[in-house]
Amino acid sequence: MTMYSNNSSSIVRLNIGGKKFCTTVDTLTHREPQSMLAAMFSGRHTVCKDSEKGYVFVDRDGKHFRHILNWLRDGVVPNLTESECSELLREAEYYQLLGLVDGITEVMNKKKEGEEMDTELTRTDIIKCVQSEKVRLRGVNLSGLDLSKLDLSYVDFSYACLKNVFFSRANLQCAKFRDVDAENTIFHNATLRECEFTGANLRGALLAGANLQSANLQDACLIDCSFCGADLRSAHLQTADLTNANLEGANLEGANLKGAKLNNANLKGANLQRAYLRHVNLRDTHLEGAKLDGANLLGAIR
């Protein structure tokens, strides 16, 4: 175990999922001082290095880590394909690089503006719609639209196609998403309190930092979703599929996870106090540092 000094020129060797990189403490801590990488090498924490060559291992895919280092060095968002941007966005969210998350989202939004989308409504149409009292967009195809930062509270999106929609920082309180197809949709820092997602397909969606207090996600497909730092207090997650989901640091106090699938889910540092986990299989779930005080674990498999 090693604690890095505050010397900004100190060399750091990183092994990211088998790909090796070399950089400095200053690069990792200067541009995004609140990130996970900055915290690791701030001199306040110990990190584990291999004894032979001194590499610090991080268990992530190293495919896009060079872009992350270039962002930390130069502040430039790379020009990538849509699928590569989505992959990089997920890595930026994991490392808590909020500046890069905003930069990638902005780049993706600009690309969307220049493309002809096979949608039935535009952002302008949606803005006009929400001025009325009751808005129903049930079954409508809104794929790829940028609806970020809009007030869409109480809108009924049930059965709609919402693939790759940008809802970042939108107010969606009490909106209905029953049985929607929202694969890879971005809900970063959105307000989703008391929303209904029953039976929704949210595979690969980004919900980091979202407020999902008392949201209903029963029977939802949440495979590969990212809920890092999300507020899921009193959320209803009965029989939801959270396989490979990232809930690191999420607040699930009082959440109901009865019958939920948590295979390989990351719940490190999550707050599960008073959560309902009866008969849930936790054997392949990562619970390091999770708070389980008062949780109902009767019959849970651990």
Image (tube, rainbow, N blue to C red):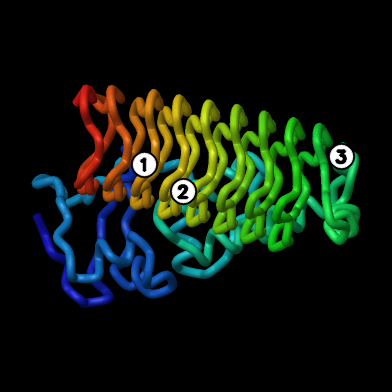
Query: Which corner quadrant holds the C terminus?
Result: top left
Where residue 220 sits in the image (x, y, percent)? Answer: 55, 29
Q: Does residue 136 appear left or right of residue 16 in this picture?
A: right
Q: Label 1 is placed on what type of residue?
A: Arg
Q: Is residue 66 visible?
A: no
Q: Nearer the viewer, residue 124 or 218?
A: 218
SS label for mark 1: loop
Quadrant in the rendering for residue 242: top left
Question: Which residue is found at the position 49% from the left and 51% from the top?
Answer: 213
- Callout 1: few (<14), some (14-19), or many (20+) C-alpha neighbours within 10 Å? some
Circle 1 is placed at which residue position?
60
Q: How many marks?
A: 3
Cα distance between the residues tagged 2 and 1: 8 Å
- Please determine whether, in this image, residue 290 is positioned above or below residue 178: below
Quadrant in the rendering for residue 300: top left
Query: Which corner quadrant holds the N terminus?
Result: bottom left
Q: Nearer the viewer, residue 66 or 239?
A: 239
- Callout 3: few (<14), some (14-19), or many (20+) C-alpha neighbours within 10 Å? some
Where residue 138 sits in the image (x, y, percent)? Answer: 80, 36
- Please determine whether, in this image, residue 296 is positioned above or below residue 76: above
- Please determine whether, in this image, residue 134 is positioned above or below residue 99: above
Quadrant in the rendering for residue 257: top left
Q: Pick whichever of labels 3 and 2 is earlier in the sequence.
A: 2
Question: Which residue is found at the position 86% from the left and 39% from the top?
Answer: 119
- Callout 2: few (<14), some (14-19), or many (20+) C-alpha neighbours within 10 Å? many
Cα distance between the residues tagged 3 and 2: 29 Å
Of all residues, the one furthest to the bottom in this rendering is: 7
Residues at marks 3 and 2 touching, judged by CB atoms closer than 8 Å: no
Q: Label 2 is placed on what type of residue?
A: Glu
Question: Which residue is found at the position 31% from the left and 48% from the top?
Answer: 270
SS label for mark 2: helix
Circle 3 is placed at which residue position?
119
